[in-house]
Image: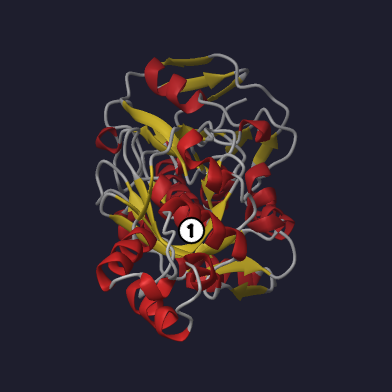
């Protein structure tokens, strides 16, 4: 069983690489140990798949080399993938912040990718453990199959219940390819006993500006029974390192709003003023944290300014995150310094490619990671096609 390429992983990146190479004439085999192709695609976006983002650019990705993603993203763009979606008659809509979703089901995206693979006569083997990988005489052997190219599209360890593993890192170690230490990303934070009052309001959300270091994102924040989540929080979690604080601005123009409340209802307490702008349970938790006992009419400008500072810079010290089980993606991964940005091929191991989430390129929340899967998959697929004479 001789092929031009063996692709490990039947997720977005792997199927995209396979379809690209196969339709150009390469003989391609895809292997995955799970029973369904595109399992992460199927659960994404609430089952509707946030398949790309209109604002995709290299600046929306984290990496030790922030320039690495530019080549692949510029050669296969969000508009290219959208054209493919439309060619398959898949209806879509834009939600907030450039996020594109299927009107129907994420199953349509998986079906589209498998259809594209079928057009290229790609062989897809599911429920097939990878097993041992051998490399000799310029060819890779996986099971009974051999090929001059091996594409690792097995992702990272996030969401292990979907079959995710760290196989890509094991393969990198086998071939001497460096790995940037992986970590959970787009992941909820856990909080300690000091913040029990906020864990007690599980399910409450509000618009907030979240900050970790220099990373700032404005979307909703969600308080959970374990800590903090919601889009703005998930965004900054990708930048977080243990020991760092997380802050939330939960009330824009807080000082002006508090002064206005003082003039309108001087006999009221802080909770009442906050409840005009925030969910009642959150207003209660904030009032308890701040501890302003006096009526608003008795609070000086200085005191109100101090309260406003807390509301616009509400600081938490996470005890950690909820880990890979709840992480939407994995940050870190295959060191981009070891790869060609044009083809995704390992510089020191000809024929070995790493694509998608396995690589140290991690997108923001909102369809960016899928676009990286499509773009990096096409980059590898085109290189394989060129070498096979396609």
Q: Residue at x 46, y 71 (%)?
A: 54
Residue lying at the far bottom of the rendered structure: 264
Q: Looking at the image, which residue is at 32% across and 26% down?
A: 349
Residue occupying the point 51% across, 25% down: 166
**Percent of width and height locating residue 255:** 33, 73
> What colouring does the structure picture have?
secondary structure
Instruction: Decide which of 62, 217 is in the foreground and name it.
Output: 217
Q: In the rendered view, tell whether residue 132 sits above or below residue 146.
A: above
Task: Identify the secondary structure beneath mark 1.
Answer: helix
Question: Is residue 218 placed above or below 290 in the rendered structure?
Answer: below
Above-or-below relation of 104 to 284:
below
How far across and how far down the image is residue 331, in percent?
A: 41, 39
Q: Could you tell whether 232 is left or right of 72 in the image?
A: right
Q: Nearer the viewer, residue 126 or 192?
A: 192
The residue beneath circle 1 is 287
Left or right of residue 37, residue 262 in this image: left
Q: Nearer the viewer, residue 234 or 328?
A: 234
User: Residue 201 appears at what percent x and percent y?
Assistant: 61, 51
Residue 13 visible in this rendered orientation of the protein: no
Q: Is residue 39 left or right of residue 389?
A: right
**Which quadrant would the N terminus be assigned to in this image?**
top right
Task: Answer few, some or many: residues within 10 Å of disc 1's Cα (few below 14, many 20 plus, some between 14 and 19).
Answer: many
Q: Is residue 143 left or right of residue 35?
A: left
The residue lying at 48 percent from left, 46 percent from top is 186
Number of on-image labels: 1
Res 117 seen here: yes
Pinpoint residue 203: horizontal percent, then vertical percent.
Answer: 65, 54
Considering only vertical position in the picture, is 383 above or below 301?
A: above
């Amino acid at each position: 069983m001789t092929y031009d390429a063996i692709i490990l992983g039947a997720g977005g990146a792997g199927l995209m690489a396979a379809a690209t190479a196969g339709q150009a004439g390469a003989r391609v085999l895809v292997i995955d140990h799970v029973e369904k192709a595109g399992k992460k695609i199927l659960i994404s976006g609430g089952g509707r798949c946030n398949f790309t983002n209109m604002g995709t650019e290299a600046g929306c990705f984290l990496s030790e080399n922030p320039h690495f993603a530019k080549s692949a993203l510029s050669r296969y763009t969000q508009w290219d993938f959208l054209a493919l979606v439309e060619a398959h008659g898949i209806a879509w809509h834009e939600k907030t912040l450039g996020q594109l979703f299927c009107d129907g089901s994420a199953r349509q995206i998986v079906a589209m990718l498998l259809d594209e693979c079928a057009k290229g006569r790609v062989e897809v083997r599911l429920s097939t453990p990878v097993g041992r990988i051998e490399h000799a005489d310029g060819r890779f052997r996986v099971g009974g199959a051999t090929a001059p190219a091996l594409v690792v599209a097995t992702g990272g360890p996030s969401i292990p219940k979907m079959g995710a593993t760290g196989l890509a890192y094991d393969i990198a170690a086998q071939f001497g390819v460096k790995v940037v230490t992986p970590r959970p990303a787009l992941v909820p934070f856990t909080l300690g006993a000091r913040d029990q009052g906020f864990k007690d309001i599980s399910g409450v959300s509000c618009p907030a500006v979240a900050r970790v270091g220099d990373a700032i994102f404005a979307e909703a924040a969600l308080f959970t029974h374990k800590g903090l989540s919601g889009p703005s929080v998930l965004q900054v979690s990708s930048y977080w390192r243990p020991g760092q604080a997380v802050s939330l601005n939960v009330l824009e123009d807080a000082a002006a709003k508090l002064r206005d409340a003082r003039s309108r209802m001087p006999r009221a307490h802080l909770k009442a003023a906050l409840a005009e702008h925030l969910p009642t349970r959150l207003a209660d938790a904030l009032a308890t944290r701040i501890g302003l006992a006096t009526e608003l009419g008795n609070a000086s400008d200085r005191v109100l300014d101090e309260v406003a500072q807390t509301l616009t810079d509400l600081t938490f010290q996470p005890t950690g995150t909820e880990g890979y089980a709840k992480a939407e993606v994995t940050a870190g991964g295959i060191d981009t310094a070891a790869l060609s940005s044009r083809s995704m091929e390992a510089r020191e191991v000809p024929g070995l490619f790493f694509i998608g989430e396995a690589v140290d390129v991690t997108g923001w929340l909102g369809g960016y990671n899928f676009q990286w899967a499509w773009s990096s998959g096409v980059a590898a697929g085109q290189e394989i096609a060129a070498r096979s004479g396609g």
